Amino acid sequence: MPNRKNTIKDFWALVRIGAPDECWPWTGGTDEDGYGRFQMNGRVMYAHRWAFEIDRDVRLTSSVLIMHRCDNPPCCNPRCLSDGTQVDNQLDKVRKQRHATRERHGRALMTWAKVRALRADRARGMSIKELSSKYEISNQQVSNIHLGRHWKEADL
């Protein structure tokens, strides 16, 4: 089994360490999303997870996610990393507006142009049922858009 100190030294040799508050990018191999990856003892590991484990002297379970405050996938600076759950990660994405929503969502049926046209049609007297048919969405969705529950202009 390899010496842990040598393994840690070899690991940090593949990280471009900068100032304490800068991102420290992984310079080794990455996956398709840009996260650093390497092999240790026959296992493929994420570089940012191992940086977190080394810095805090912990062993993470698979249910623990390591999140980047900097939103920079190759970053291994422990100051940029925090642990959390899947729920924490999703809330972080929403807070930072990195999630797919409205027009950015791959299965969105509406666009801002259609939403504005729907609202104008409703203001001219078209019924919910007519709008549902015209825009090919449910009556409930038409109602939610018309009443401002969904597709809020303030969210632009």
Image: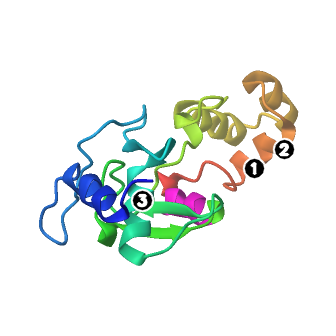
- Residues marked 2 and 1 touching at CB (< 8 Å): yes
Question: Which residue is painted at 36% across and 60% down in the image?
Answer: 3
Residue type pointed to by label 3: Trp
* Position in image of residue 45 (x %, y %): 47, 48
Residue at 38% from the left image edge and 52% from the top image edge = 47
Please name which of the two marks, 1 or 3, marks the residue nearer to the observer: 3
Element at label 2: helix
Q: Where is residue 30 in the image (x, y as percent from the top left)?
A: 36, 37
Sequence-first disc among 2 and 3 = 3
Q: Which residue is drawn at 66% across and 35% down?
A: 118
Q: Which of marks 1 and 3 is nearer the N terminus?
A: 3
With 82 as the anchor, is 61 left or right in this view? right
**SS assignment for the magenta stretch, majority:** helix
Q: Is residue 75 magenta?
A: no
Q: Identify the residue at image location x=36%, y=55%.
A: 71
The residue range painted magenta reads 88-96
Decide which of 36, 57 is in the foreground and name it.
57
Residue 124: image x %, image y %? 69, 37
Alpha carbon distance from label 2 to label 1: 6 Å
- Which mark identifies residue 140? 2
Relative to 1, is 146 on the left or the right?
A: right
Residue 69 visible? The answer is: no
Q: What residue type is labelled 2?
A: Gln
- Marking on residue 50: 3
Provide the residue designation for mark 1. 144
